[in-house]
Image (spheres, helix red, strand yellow):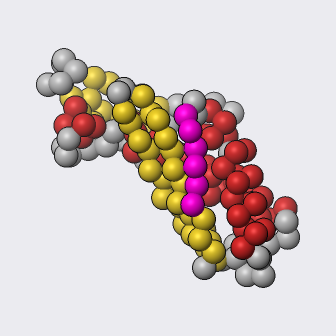
């Protein structure tokens, strides 16, 4: 399977603007700029897209891990916080809340660690990955 996205940038790094389009067109000429990346401008930025990808991948993997253990989650909700410092992503922190009938906290925590380690995005990131898990 191959997925793709396209970035177009016009102008200098600080004053220029760009847009991103994904294969599915969920992002369709979506604006990004220096301001949306490093300040509070309108548009997206690469770090929030990495956060979205990591949250989505991890949450789906966690559902599969739980299923293999015989549990079906009612709800899994994950927030991913990406930390950028000195031009490098230094941390991806996953904050997950799960409502999983019949599971113990210990089983849930073990499943979270498994998903944290083994989701494809986790495996592709060259940074520290941590998580906080709450069983509802």
Vertical placement of 13 versus 52: above or below? above
Where on the picture, by quarter, is residue 76?
bottom right
Give yes or no for residue 19 being in the magenta stretch: no
Segment colored magenta: 127-132
Q: Which residue is more in the foreground, 88 or 11? A: 88
Tell me which residue sits at (57%, 30%) in the image: 126
Quadrant where the image shows the C terminus: bottom right
Q: Residue 56: in sight, yes or no?
A: no
> In this orientation, which residue lies closer to the viewer: 25 or 63?
63
Residue at 58% in and 49% down:
130
Quadrant where the N terminus sits is: top right
Which residue is found at the position 23% from the left and 33% from the top?
A: 33
Where is residue 115 shown, x and y percent of the image?
70, 52
Q: Where 2 falls versus 83 (above or below)?
A: above
Q: Nearer the viewer, residue 32 or 2?
A: 32
Residue 56 placement, left or right of 82: right
Q: Position of residue 72 (x, y in %)?
A: 75, 73
């Amino acid at each position: 399977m191959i997925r793709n996205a396209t970035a177009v940038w016009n102008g200098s790094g600080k004053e220029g603007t760009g847009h991103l389009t994904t294969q599915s067109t969920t992002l369709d000429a979506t604006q990004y700029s220096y301001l949306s990346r490093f300040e509070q401008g309108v548009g997206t930025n690469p770090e929030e897209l990495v956060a979205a990808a990591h949250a989505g991948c991890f949450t789906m993997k966690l559902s599969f891990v739980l299923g293999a253990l015989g549990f079906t989650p009612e709800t899994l909700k994950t927030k991913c916080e990406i930390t950028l410092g000195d031009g490098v992503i230094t941390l991806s922190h996953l904050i997950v809340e799960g409502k999983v009938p019949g599971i113990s906290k210990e089983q849930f925590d073990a499943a979270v660690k498994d998903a944290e380690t083994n989701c494809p995005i986790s495996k592709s990131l060259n940074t520290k990955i941590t998580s906080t898990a709450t069983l509802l």
